[in-house]
Image (cartoon, rainbow, N blue to C red):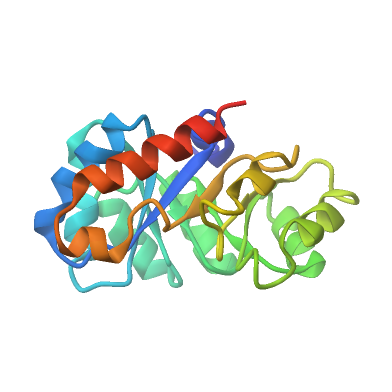
Amino acid sequence: MTADIADLLRGARILPVLTVPETASALPLADALAEAGVSCAEVTLRTPQALDVLEAMAAHGGLTVGAGTVITPRQAERAVAAGAAFVVCPGLDTEVIATCHELGVPVLPGIATATELMRALSVGINTVKLFPAEQIGGTALLRALAAPFPQVRFVPTGGIGADNADDYFAEPSVLAVGGSWLTPAQALARGDYQCIRDLASQAVQRSTP
């Protein structure tokens, strides 16, 4: 592998999860996030233009951009071809992990249980996405998993917003916090990049130790 996901995210602390319906939004969105101090972003493969958005944002140069909602090896291959610097999965699929290893790209698989976490460790993964974090137990579950697996770092995502992000930032096992609250769909739809810039700036400030 060319890098470890922990190396990419260690200084980031915030991982915006972006669902962008229009390619035209890619560059102004990248500008807004970079100007706010965000260094990494995840473009989810949930829209028809997602790969084009990813390619445009990766070419921006101000962000390290990865692909999210990757659930098949083929999606991983296409995402990396489009410029993804890392791959994020909602769950743990060993074929996707193997493909990412072959491509030399860091991968952040999702886990929700101790069993899945042990499977991740068995294939050499010790940084995982806890998903959907709030819905499956929040920080209480996070602490319960971190206790027997002190070598693991978590990127909790799912149900996290400005009202509860601080709870996750305070956890020693948390490498970074992922979320979509920095880029509300309504703000994207109306092209309100100042709103996005402000939300992202606030999140960056709050995440700083």
The residue located at (41%, 49%) in the rendering is: 16
Residue sitting farthest toward the right: 148
Image check: 2 left or right of 195? right
The residue located at (25%, 65%) in the rendering is: 186
- From this viewpoint, is residue 199 visible? yes
Q: Quadrant of residue 19?
A: bottom left
Q: Position of residue 96 (x, y in %)?
A: 50, 64
User: Residue 95 versus residue 55: which sits nearer the camera?
Assistant: 55
Q: How many marks?
A: 0
The residue located at (33%, 67%) in the rendering is: 45
Q: Is residue 36 above or below residue 91?
A: above
User: Residue 196 versus residue 4: which sits nearer the camera?
Assistant: 196
- From this viewpoint, is residue 2 visible? no
Q: Is residue 115 above or below residue 14?
A: below
Q: Position of residue 72 (x, y in %)?
A: 43, 72
Q: Position of residue 65 (x, y in %)?
A: 33, 44
Image check: 119 left or right of 84? right
Image check: 33 left or right of 60? right
Q: Quadrant of residue 35?
A: top left
User: Residue 185 versus residue 112: which sits nearer the camera?
Assistant: 185
